[in-house]
Image (spheres, rainbow, N blue to C red):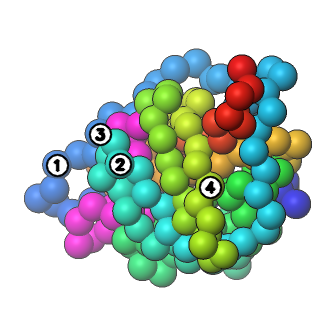
Amino acid sequence: MAATGIALLAVAAFAPHPTQPPPPPAARTPHTPATPPAGEDLPVLGPARPVRITVEDIGLDAAVDAVGTADDGTIALPDQGDHAGWYTASPTPGQRGNALLVGHVDTTRGPAVFYALGALRKGDRIAVQRADGSTAQFTVTTTNVYPQKRFPTETVYAPTTQPRLTLITCTDWDNATRTYTANLVITAHPEPKPGKS
């Protein structure tokens, strides 16, 4: 079941490393519903825990850890900054439903797993390797930035009838408050089955 009712992803626990360049600017398009193209027959996989995520367009290749809910009600983040986290209350990537992956944008030591996520654009491809040896292939369909105080929890975490992958990280560092003030949300869907249009 998708994570409806779960609180907003936690604000990053780390300040950016002072010598690193800023992450790529995230797309700032008006909110676009994360729905697959109408009438498409999308491939559906069975349950299998994700173990790795790769995105060649941005040089992302990282292990995926299982994460649950933190004590404050937010989705927990991975202990290691260079790992992504799959929220275990959501489907596994490739199943029917909204699979949620989260990650840090940076740590005190430098860029973290989702540092380059802001460079993703519609049409970019994401691969999630799964514990059963299969790979769930996705294509980015929307990129949105939401202020943390107005984060649309029910929309981002909503259950779906078709497979969807949702990636979430922090963005918009505020030097005055020493916190991130927004979240970057990337949604992706599998490509239609061969022979479908």
Name the N-terminal-most of marks 2 and 1. 1
Which of the labelled discs sits on residue 24, or is there none?
3
Mark 2 lies on a secondary structure that is helix
Task: Give the magenta-colored segment's residue range.
Answer: 104-120
Between circles 2 and 1, the one closer to the viewer is 2
Residue to which mark 2 is pinned: 56
Residue at (76, 57) in percent of width and height: 45
Judging depth in this view, the residue of 18 and 124 nearest the camera is 124
Task: In the rendered view, tell whether residue 14 sits above or below residue 196.
Answer: below
Name the N-terminal-most of marks 3 and 4. 3
Which of the labelled discs sits on residue 136, or is there none?
4
Residue to which mark 1 is pinned: 21
Mark 4 lies on a secondary structure that is strand
Asked whether residue 102 appears in the rendered view, the answer is: no
Mark 3 lies on a secondary structure that is loop
Specify whether 80 is left or right of 116. right
Q: CA distance from mark 2 to mark 3?
A: 16 Å
